[in-house]
Image (tube, rainbow, N blue to C red):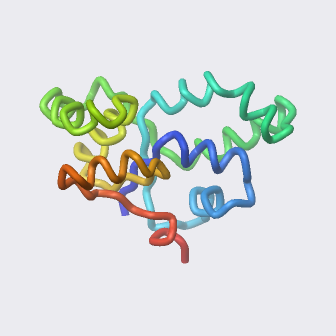
Amino acid sequence: MIIVVDTNIVFSAILDPQSNFAETLLKPKSKNRFYSTTSLILEIDRHKAKIKKLAGYSEEEFQFLYRQITSKIKFYNPNLIPSEILSYAHNLCHDIDLEDTEFVALTEHIRGNLWSGDKKLKKGLANKGWSKFVSLKELLP
């Protein structure tokens, strides 16, 4: 399955490497292919100090988990997504959460499913008829 991973999933996996989120991302020989936009890397970097503090990680522990988890994700430059798709995603997300536009656009572009824990986003997009989500439950063995 082609899966676009949003920031809150990766945050959860880094914060708790024993979680089902981390287990799903790190599963060896998984048939799932994980993608995200390069913005996810910037977002994690912006919140690195907070993540380290919440989890009690040293810099080395954080870097180890960060590299381990992000190595399972193929990152896509959002500038390579066609403008029509970005516009469509913007129209879907503009009154819900603009920060999720790239994830929705990438999901559309690669014909995948979006893995997000954002309930507001899921509800808002479902109300607009967009339902290309995948849940953790669906990804667990």
- Left or right? Give the position of 110 relative to 38: left
The image shows residue 124 at horizontal and vertical percentages of: 30, 47
Q: Residue furthest bottom?
A: 141
- Left or right? Give the position of 80 relative to 75: left
Please determine whether, in this image, residue 14 is positioned above or below residue 141: above
Please determine whether, in this image, residue 43 is positioned above or below residue 5: above
- Left or right? Give the position of 90 relative to 26: left
Q: Which of the 4 image quarters holds residue 62?
A: top right
The residue positioned 16% from the left and 36% from the top of the image is 88
Give the camera-side residue of 52 and 33. Answer: 52
User: Which image quarter holds the C terminus?
Assistant: bottom right
The image shows residue 131 at horizontal and vertical percentages of: 26, 58
Q: Which of the 4 image quarters holds residue 61?
A: top right
The residue positioned 40% from the left and 49% from the top of the image is 4
The residue positioned 62% from the left and 42% from the top of the image is 11
The image shows residue 86 at horizontal and vertical percentages of: 21, 31
Q: Residue furthest left?
A: 84
- Left or right? Give the position of 81 relative to 123: left
The residue positioned 40% from the left and 46% from the top of the image is 120
Give the camera-side residue of 126 and 78. Answer: 126
Please count the marks in the image: 0
Give the camera-side residue of 59 and 71. Answer: 59
User: Which image quarter holds the N terminus?
Assistant: bottom left
